[in-house]
Image: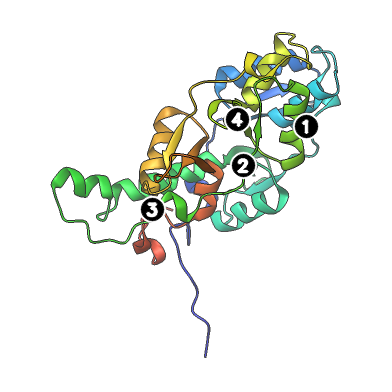
Amino acid sequence: MDTPISKNTLSDVFVKNAMRRKITTLPQNSSIDFSINTLIKHKINGVLTLDDSGKPSGVVSKTDIIGAYYATLPIDTPLEHIMASPPLVCSIDDRLEDALEKMRESSVYRLYVTGNEGTIVGSLAYPDIVGLLYRSCYECAYSHFRNAIEGAVDTVKRLNVKDVVALEYKTVSPTDTLFKVMEELSAYRIGAILVTDDNNFPIGVISKTDLILAYKHGIEQESQAFLIMTSPVQTCNADDLLETAVRKMIFSDIHRLFVRNEEDGDINGVFSLADAARCRSGSCHACISSRITIDH
């Protein structure tokens, strides 16, 4: 007897359905300083670098820039000294499931997309996949928000944040150095760290964006964490609907929410766009049988 194939909202969907066609590029001899300006301006996490002939040569991400900050490289260092090469790619006709698995196995946030002639025609990152999932949920007849607006009785078993949340998260104190913050981010391969006071109360967050801006503005590594942290901490509840938390991240333009336990209000995890993408099945159990309809 054949084993049934599990389906979800990404089954039979292709990279071309979720990718973004705009690619942000920089010459590989551009400075780290200029790349930070570009990342902040376009609200992206990485840029594709081009060699002297205009061909893709590598990728520079916020993680690479933080590595340069940690290594005390001058801010005018050319990108070719810190870029990851070659760029990791997928095909425009690859299944989205396969691209997502490649991102997970390679521990990368994005892939660059090649067209039929092998040239790079776009990029695919976790937010792109989440956006596809969210649109599917919003347009679906089982949509929580649609049912709420229409006053319909919601009979669908839905996913909550606690069903997919990563329980492990890291903290630093406001007086810890930025050097320590960077070590923690690197050691645990995380995108942000929670800043807590002496009573373990969350008072801020330091993200990779905060760190690259500190690098740009010449803030010393021995400076204390509270100088660059972002407040207040963006949170959701463990019992919130997955659809609600994803909606908050998309419309607030943030990449993660720290998760509170509703019983005592303590932080007990973190939920990111990457977690939402890896979930694959939208916001309710009805998505086990795929209902996405996309023009291929």
Rendered view: 169 above or below 224: below
Q: Are marks 3 and 2 in contact (CB under 8 Å)?
A: no
Task: Report the number of discs.
Answer: 4
Specify which label sits upstream in the sequence, 4 or 2. 4
Crowd class of label 2 (few under 14; some 14 to 19; many from 20; radius 10 Å): some
Q: Amino acid at mark 3?
A: Ser
Coordinates of residue 215 in the picture (x, y in percent): 73, 15
Q: Judging from the image, what secondary structure is the residue with disc 2 in? A: loop
Observer-nearest of 250 and 170 = 170
Of tags 4 and 3, the one toward the viewer is 3
Q: Position of residue 116 (x, y in %)?
A: 62, 48
Residue 183 disc label: 1
Q: Residue 283 — which label? A: 3
Residue lying at 82% horizontally and 27% vertically, measured from the top left: 82
Q: Nearer the viewer, residue 203 or 68?
A: 203
Tell me whether circle 4 and circle 3 mark residues in contact (CB < 8 Å). no
Tell me which numbered mark, 2 or 1, is placed earlier along the sequence. 2
Quarter holding residue 197: top right
What residue does disc 4 label? 23
Residue 61's disc number:
none
Q: Secondary structure at mark 3?
A: loop
Q: Amino acid at mark 1?
A: Glu
Is 172 positioned to the left or the right of 254 in the image? Answer: right
Of the two numbered discs 1 and 3 in the rendering, the one whose residue sits closer to the viewer: 1
| Mark toward the start of the polypeptide (3 vs 2) | 2
Whether residue 58 is situated above or below residue 242 in the rendered picture = above
Q: Secondary structure at mark 1?
A: helix
Tag 2 residue: 169
Quarter assignment of residue 109? top right
